[in-house]
Image (cartoon, rainbow, N blue to C red):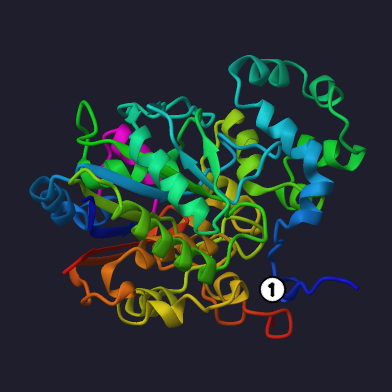
Amino acid sequence: MARITASVYTSHVPAVGAALDLGKTGEAYWQPVFKGYEFSKQWEKEQKPDVIFLVFNDHATAFSLDLIPTFAIGTAAEFNPADEGWGPRPVPKVVGHPKLAAHIAQSVIQDDFDLTIVNKMDVDHGLTVPLSLMFGQPDAWPCPIIPFAVNVVQYPVPSGRRCFMLGKAIRKAIESYDEPLNVQIWGTGGMSHQLQGPRAGLINKEFDKAFLDRLIDDPEGLSKMPHIDYVREAGSEGIELVMWLIARGAMSDINGGRKPTVRHRFYHVPASNTAVGHLILENN
Amino acid sequence: MSLDKPYKDIPGTTIFDADMSRQGYHLNQFCMSLMKAENRARFKANERAYLDEWPMSEEQKQAVLARDLNRCIELGGNIYFLAKIGATDGKSFQQMAGSMTGMTEEAYRDMMVKGGRSVEGNRSVGEKK
């Protein structure tokens, strides 16, 4: 049977991708950010995941205002890195896992989550920056990836509670798949940041640290936090953090298992306009 | 009965909800068109003529021509869409974000390096000094 072995949480700041692509990782401004992921890259080499279920959001790239799916699962065989206006990032194409993705879609929809199924989609920095942070700059990504896009651009976005419950359904789906796969689930976006209006540049370290603490120890309680608290405390784009609750909801302890082990925790301000947060939790 | 929108109380912030999206539909779709290199070239060659191809309001067109991102947002623009204009102009996301705060580019960058804008005094309109 397939098994979720770990969850990974990370910001997906586009400037981080640009810094990597332009060879700026050694600059004093960027060094502390990339240092925070050195452990993670080594850890991934040891973990050798077979598939990554990657929760991210599209930033007006694949989805314009023509179509705004709340939850969209990528079931294609491959996904190309998108041109977001600066040219596509020079990173490998993303190879999907259509068979597992179709299985998850079937299971999760029957569990009352009405997913949109996407057979054609370019993937933007929301998906490729986390891959770069966790795997560096390889010629090909080390395993297939199932992109799972969440609408956090047009309000109302799904509630933290809904995301958390969805994570549970995704776990059930993955663990009912017959092949013995080592699956990781990643939640990306955040942490506190606001990119618009006179309040742009907002960062709230206290909020972010408390969010990381509660994500580890009290995910159920954290999932009940209303939208307004994210927006007020973590900025209008800080709402991306609801996506972390999908990954957290897919961990074993939510379904009666043992608490996960915190393998790595990192926090740094700033990367461009944003607070960078990163966490690795291993199932026991 | 009107819907509860508690986020109206947050200073310096416009939440891009379904109603704003309705108002900004053509403005944002115009921005989306700038994802294609040939459209960027046509826009740069004659901005006004390119904008006139879109059923946007005159206020929206003026806001785009002036690169007044706060006004664009007030008229239904969303920052991720408006970022396509910035990309066309060769601006970074940090330059765009900073341009909405009334700060210089350097002052905004310095603020971020020092830990960003504090939430204190910025939680609600009533709290804002």
Residue B40 shown left or right of residue A244 in the figure:
right
Chain at tag 1: B
Q: At 26% across and 52% down in the image, what residue appears?
A: A184
Residue A182 is situated, as x and y percent measured from the top left of the image, at 19, 49
Q: Amino acid at mark 1?
A: Ile
In the figure, A24 relative to A3: above or below?
above
Residue B115 in view:
yes
Q: Judge the density around disc 1: few (<14), some (14-19), many (≥20) Cα neighbours within 10 Å.
A: many
The residue stretch that appears in magenta: A11-29
Residue B124 is situated, as x and y percent measured from the top left of the image, at 68, 80
Q: At 78% across and 34% down in the image, what residue appears?
A: B65
Q: Nearer the viewer, residue A226 or A134?
A: A226
Residue A278 is situated, as x and y percent measured from the top left of the image, at 30, 61
Q: Is residue A198 a member of the stretch shown in magenta?
A: no
Position of the C terminus of chain A, as image quadrant, is bottom left
Secondary structure under the numbered disc 1 in the rendered image: loop
Residue position for label 1? B10
Q: At 49% across and 28% down in the image, what residue appears?
A: A86
Among all residues in the image, which is located at the extreme bottom?
B127
Q: Nearer the viewer, residue A237 or A102?
A: A102
Residue A26 in view:
no
Q: Is residue A18 a member of the stretch shown in magenta?
A: yes
